[in-house]
Amino acid sequence: MNLDNIFAKKEIWEEIECPICDVQEKPSHYRDISSWEYKGVYKLSRCTKCGLIFQTPRIKNQYACLYYQSEKYWGVTLPHFSRRQVETKNNFQRYKQVYKRYQERKPGRMLDVGCGTGEFLDWFKCKGWETVGTDISLKPLVYAKKTLGLEVIHGDLLEIDQRKKTFDLVSTMHVFEHLYEPRKSLKKISTILKDSGELIITIPNHESLGRILFGASWFQYQPGRHIFYYTPDTIKRMLSLCGFEVVDVDYWTKKDSLYSIYQSIRYTFSPKFRKSSEGGIASGDPKLARVKREFSLTYEVSKGVASIITALIFVTEYFFGLSEVITVYAKKA
Ligand SMILES: [Zn+2]
């Protein structure tokens, strides 16, 4: 069945309130955004009390998997494992800062929530950690199990059965903004994490310079998948509400931030993407690939200019603590 037809059904949508505050009044409308993959305009609201930004109405949780069907989403052509080395290298560059932090740590037991194809977990496994991954999408998990030999669980974090206080580390890399029940999820993490354990959250930063500059064309606005848009302040509030305290916030997320800025420039200036935001060309559409393969001087020059602007914005963001993506380290309070 066509996705647009499913999304058109009113009964699969729900309105939500701020998960941090018990505010009686309706959250105020913040802005409308469109997706470059799916049709329609999505509404974002801002909590009048704590400032948390979230998508409401949102599609109900049981239908959320519809947004994760595209294989392109996982960055690999899943049935073919030829890209494994490339993926491992990309993953290493992406999470270099996290790996630096854990390089010398005594290995323990870890859980990666939303592990996808499993490259992040694989680094820890190679360092001697006992690893478990979980994801709501089955296809990438099959890949993680078959190619990387990882122990994986298919399902929602809230439903997986794990013994209490048995993990030394729980990670959610680019996952927390997708979680439907962030408070319940943190409570669950708190029960399975040892008292001395650590939690890593890598999320887009709604307080980034990129968001301010690009507005509705900001790359991290991904309605359907990104439900909540945190800032260093709102994620700290959320964590403290669930018994965690922030140990460290890392703004040096080079690979993710550069990618985010570059994509935002494309969404803002490329007619191709502007058009797709109205019509909805999927990221894996061959139409996009065909345009890329043809040589065009204008395209090459704009790519160069976009790269220079990207670098300038990235340096400014880091310098002022306004990075596109942040990594938060937390422990039980
Ligand atoms: Zn609130």
Image (cartoon, helix red, strand yellow):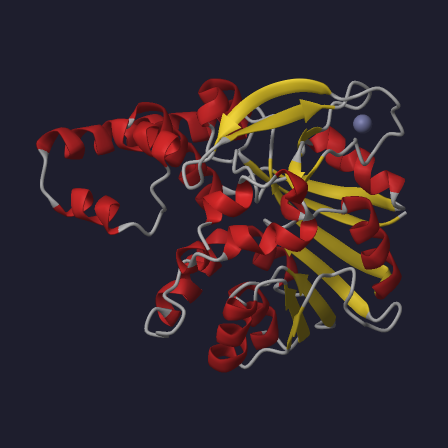
Instruction: Check the image and report above or below for 78 versus 299.
Output: below
Marker count (numbered): 0
Foreground pick, 229 / 109: 229
Residue 90 position within the rendered picture, expressed as x and y whole percent measured from the top left: 41, 58
Q: Specify the quadrant of the image occupied by residue 52.
A: top right
Vertical placement of 277 versus 85: above or below?
above
Location of residue 173 with respect to 83 vertically, above or below: above
Q: Quadrant of residue 47?
A: top right
Q: Which of 143 and 55 lies nearest the eye of the viewer?
A: 55
Residue at 65%, 38% (x, y): give it: 58
Q: Position of residue 127 (x, y in %)?
A: 60, 74
Q: Nearer the viewer, residue 329 or 146?
A: 146
In the displayed structure, does residue 303 sit left or right of residue 267? left
Q: Residue at x 16, y 35 (%)?
A: 300
Q: Looking at the image, which residue is at 36% across and 66% down?
A: 77
Q: Is residue 50 left or right of residue 134?
A: right
Q: Compared with residue 332, is residue 140 higher up or lower down, i.e. above or below?
A: below
**Can you tell me which quadrant of the image ligand 1 is in?**
top right
- Locate residue 188, reporting x and y percent: 84, 58
Asked whether the viewer can see residue 228, the reply is no
Q: Position of residue 306 (x, y in %)?
A: 29, 29
